[in-house]
Image (spheres, helix red, strand yellow):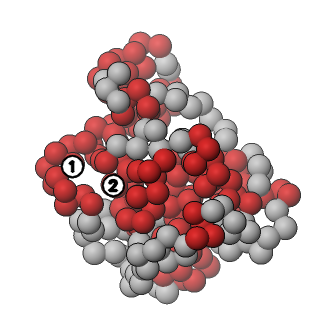
Amino acid sequence: LGGNVSRLSMYLRHGMLGLREVAAHARAVMRGRERDEFLRQLTWAEFYRLVLRQEGARVLGNLEDPKYPARWTDTLPDDVREARTGLPCADAWVTHLIRDGWLHNHERLWFAAYLVHWRGVDWRAGYALFREHLLDGDIANNALSWQWVASTFSNKPYFMNQENIDRFSGGRWCRTCRAECPFRASYGELETQLFGTQP
């Protein structure tokens, strides 16, 4: 996927590096928008750690009600777990997760949105899948990122469309995909389709 990726998350997760240490280094060697975005991601990690410290085990359940009439199943579908959904992008995300123990942030968000909003699976099943396979999957970032997508820790659900996937993946899957794409619509159309009304 496009963009610079530090690959530091596993070192941060296992305490080999600290957030302040990494932030100080970034301020010293990076410049402009790249530095600002990197520091923003570190800030999210610190924020999620603080929420975990305050809320404890409550982060493993909905911190808020979803912002739309969600009807979720608790079970991860077999076709998702086995990377045979028929969608090249979704199957690649699962394959990458299981094979490499890591996913780009865009892939994590896309997969979470697909699972929760398109497949109607409770975010906790996705959290458990990530917890099982991610080498950098700490409780705070994992649970609260899933809740952010599901809108149980945000003011609206996160979702994407095909144009977003195509743009930020450099066309990796979309340009050769022959599947009936559930993401191929405008944001407004998908919002109505997925949530019934504007969330």
Instruction: List the single residue furthest toward the left.
Output: 54
Helix, strand or loop under label 1: helix
Disc sitting over residue 24 in the figure: none
Q: Residue at x 79, y 70 (%)?
A: 179
Q: Is residue 33 left or right of residue 20?
A: right
Where residue 18 appears, x then y in whole percent?
A: 31, 24
Identify the mark nearer the N-term, 2 or 1: 1
The percent position of residue 19, horizontal first and vertical second, equals 32, 27
State whether residue 155 appears in this view: no
Which residue is disc 2 drawn over?
Answer: 144
- Quarter of the figure that contains the C terminus: bottom left
Q: What amino acid type is highlighted by mark number 2? A: Leu
Mark 1 highlights which residue? 51
Q: Which of the 4 image quarters holds residue 144?
A: bottom left
Q: Is residue 192 above or below residue 112?
A: below
Query: Which kind of residue does numbered mark 1 sit on?
Result: Val
Mark 2 and mark 1 residues within 8 Å of each other at the beta carbon: yes
